[in-house]
Image (tube, grey):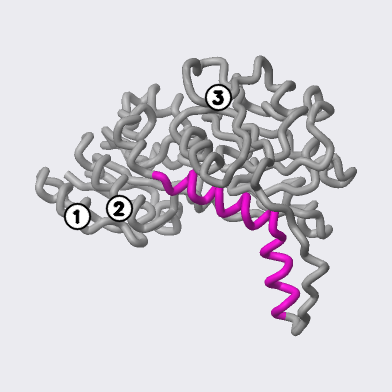
């Protein structure tokens, strides 16, 4: 029986040893090989990350596949219906809350994006690289006493709230599924949007949350606020948010995700707006991509099969 890793770069050696101890033959591959090969007989387990969509065309290359392993909580990079149709078990980190509470990488990246945005760090750095030293061009704001609105007070949202408290911020949140905590709960998303200096999104992508920030509620956003997204790109309507950035209703955006990241990057309205020198920071979905976190997740998930 073969475990095939579609994205083996930097994969945990301990996880490899775990697979071998279970009696599997571990093989490192890559998406180019998978796309250009008709079939992979004898592969029972396929390991993926987030580089591309696992669709029907990919799944049908693996006639013996019993498990698809993805050390992620988000599943929008996988055609779950095809897996169900073919009786292939999906093994992910969704629902592994006790373990995931030990992994702060996405919350830490959220904070890095927030600080970079509010202090104009990327633009200031680029200007210095050009040989300039223009201190007054890059004045930002301090976080103390600013109000952060957290959409989704789950594992990551709670960590971000803890960081915000340490910086002396006021913390409020909107999450209809959470009660009993130390933070101010907003009764509606619109209430949070209208009263937050910084809005940070921390929800799973579902039918309920797709385009959660949209044309209907963007008008409620407090003028001059900042928006941070380390969830999934489709949580927001990118066309609407790009327009709000252009009109300066939203003063800046920092995002680790784009709606089109698995297809055509250049078609994203936010990527296009960034090319027009809007105040936007985009990172390539690296929130959870720290070596120690990824190794821990890979080792943990190898023990779930």
Residue of label 1: 14
Whether residue 78 can be seen here: no
State the extent of the magenta-drawn residues as a range: 104-129
Point out residue 281 in the picture as x, y percentages from the top left corner. Answer: 68, 55
User: Where residue 295 is drawn, which disc sits there?
Assistant: 2
Q: Are marks 1 and 2 in contact (CB under 8 Å)?
A: yes
- Foreground residue among 45 and 293: 293
- Foreground residue among 184 and 39: 184
Helix, strand or loop for disc 3: loop
- Earlier along the polypeptide chain: callout 1 or callout 2? 1
Residue of label 3: 206
Q: Does 268 sit left or right of 90 as displayed?
A: right
Tell whether position 112 is magenta: yes
Q: Is residue 96 above or below residue 233?
A: above
Marks 3 and 1 sit apart, C-alpha to C-alpha, by 33 Å
Q: Residue at x 52, y 29 (%)?
A: 204
Marks 3 and 2 sit apart, C-alpha to C-alpha, by 27 Å
Q: Does 287 sit left or right of 142 as displayed?
A: left
Tell me which secondary structure the magenta stretch mostly adopts. helix
Q: Is residue 281 above or below residue 80?
A: below
């Amino acid at each position: 029986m073969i475990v095939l890793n579609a994205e083996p770069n930097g994969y945990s050696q301990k996880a490899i040893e775990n697979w071998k101890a279970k009696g599997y033959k571990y093989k490192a591959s890559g998406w180019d090989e998978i796309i250009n090969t008709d079939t992979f007989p004898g592969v029972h387990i396929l390991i993926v990350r987030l580089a591309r969509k696992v669709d029907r065309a990919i799944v049908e290359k693996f006639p013996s596949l019993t498990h698809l392993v993805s050390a992620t909580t988000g599943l929008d990079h996988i055609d779950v219906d095809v897996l169900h149709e073919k009786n292939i078990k999906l093994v992910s980190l969704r629902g592994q809350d006790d373990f995931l509470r030990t992994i702060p990488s996405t919350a830490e990246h959220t904070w890095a994006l927030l600080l970079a945005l509010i202090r104009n760090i990327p633009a200031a750095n680029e200007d210095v690289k050009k040989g300039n030293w223009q201190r007054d061009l890059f004045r930002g704001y301090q976080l103390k006493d600013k109000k952060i609105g957290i959409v989704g007070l789950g594992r990551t949202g709670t960590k971000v709230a803890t960081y915000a408290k340490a910086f002396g911020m006021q913390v409020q949140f909107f999450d209809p599924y959470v009660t009993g905590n130390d933070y101010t709960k907003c009764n509606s998303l619109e209430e949070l949007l209208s009263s937050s200096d910084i809005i940070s999104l921390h929800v799973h992508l579902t039918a309920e949350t797709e385009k959660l920030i949209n044309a209907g509620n963007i008008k409620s956003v407090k003028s001059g606020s900042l928006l941070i997204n380390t969830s999934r790109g489709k949580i927001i309507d990118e066309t609407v948010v790009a327009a709000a950035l252009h009109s300066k209703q939203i003063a800046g955006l920092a995002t680790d995700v784009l709606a089109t990241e698995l297809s055509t990057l250049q078609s994203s309205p936010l990527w296009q707006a960034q090319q027009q020198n809007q105040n936007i920071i985009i990172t390539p979905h690296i929130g959870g991509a720290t070596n120690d976190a990824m190794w821990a997740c890979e080792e943990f998930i190898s023990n779930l099969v």
